[in-house]
Amino acid sequence: RIHEQDALSILDVKLSDIGTSNDACCFWAHECGFDAITASPFPGNIAALWASCSARDLGLFLLCLMSNPEADMFMKARLGEEYAYERIAREIESNGITGAVIGATISDEDRMRLVNTLTSRLVLVPGIGAQKGSFGVVESFGRRCVVNVSRDVIFSDDPAARARSYRDMIRDIVS
């Protein structure tokens, strides 16, 4: 039913496994009608996972800099002159992967680093609403953003009105 509303269906599975397990997840995500999945880049098999997704016309959003503050110990680890999240963003950009998961709660400094690295891919933005993230990521990446607002909508007294309110706020920012 979600496709009847012209909306994307993204399986937020944060896939992080070996090739055959990834293939099975991609197969079932496609069979169930999802448009894209989320995955962790840390197993290192990014190219193989992207090939598996592409073969099934399935988008892939790699975790880049999450809204979860505990993830910083890994995402902000230094890899030489850059942070791990910058390396992930470069991999997404250079491999033509659908996009990156970048939380709305990130700092302005991190956001600017990503704006300079991730220049053409989509950005899945969690963290607006219940997590109190800002619209800074949406302002920086504009129409390339896919904004996810869940808890603040579904636990609202009037979910439809709350969803429309967010839609209108986002539309005003990217217009």
Image: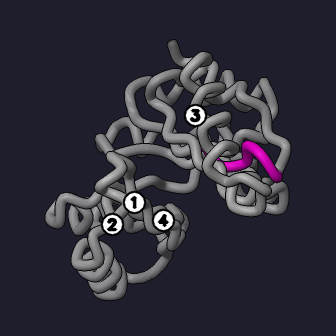
Q: Circle 3 sits on which residue?
A: 167
Amino acid type at mark 3: Arg
* Residue 4: % across, % down: 30, 55
Q: Nearer the viewer, residue 157 or 65?
A: 157
Q: Is residue 27 left or right of residue 18?
A: left
Asked if the magenta segment contains residue 126, the reply would be yes
Is residue 114 placed above or below 16 in the rendered structure?
above
- Which mark lies nearer to you, 1 or 4? 1
The answer to whether the residue labelled 2 contacts the one labelled 1, judged by CB atoms less than 8 Å apart, is yes
* Within-10-Å neighbours for mark 4: few <14, some 14–19, many 20+: many
* Within-10-Å neighbours for mark 1: few <14, some 14–19, many 20+: some
Q: Is residue 82 left or right of residue 116?
A: right
Q: Circle 4 sits on which residue?
A: 39
- Give whichever of discs 2 and 1 has the lower sequence position: 1
In whole angstroms, how far apart are the C-alphas of marks 3 and 1? Answer: 16 Å
Q: Circle 1 sits on which residue?
A: 9
* Residue 169: % across, % down: 65, 26
Is residue 123 placed above or below 12 in the rendered structure?
above
Which residues make up the magenta segment? 125-130
Q: Nearer the viewer, residue 158 or 65?
A: 158
| Label number found at residue 34 | 2
Residue 152: in sight, yes or no?
A: yes
In whole angstroms, how far apart are the C-alphas of marks 1 and 4? Answer: 15 Å
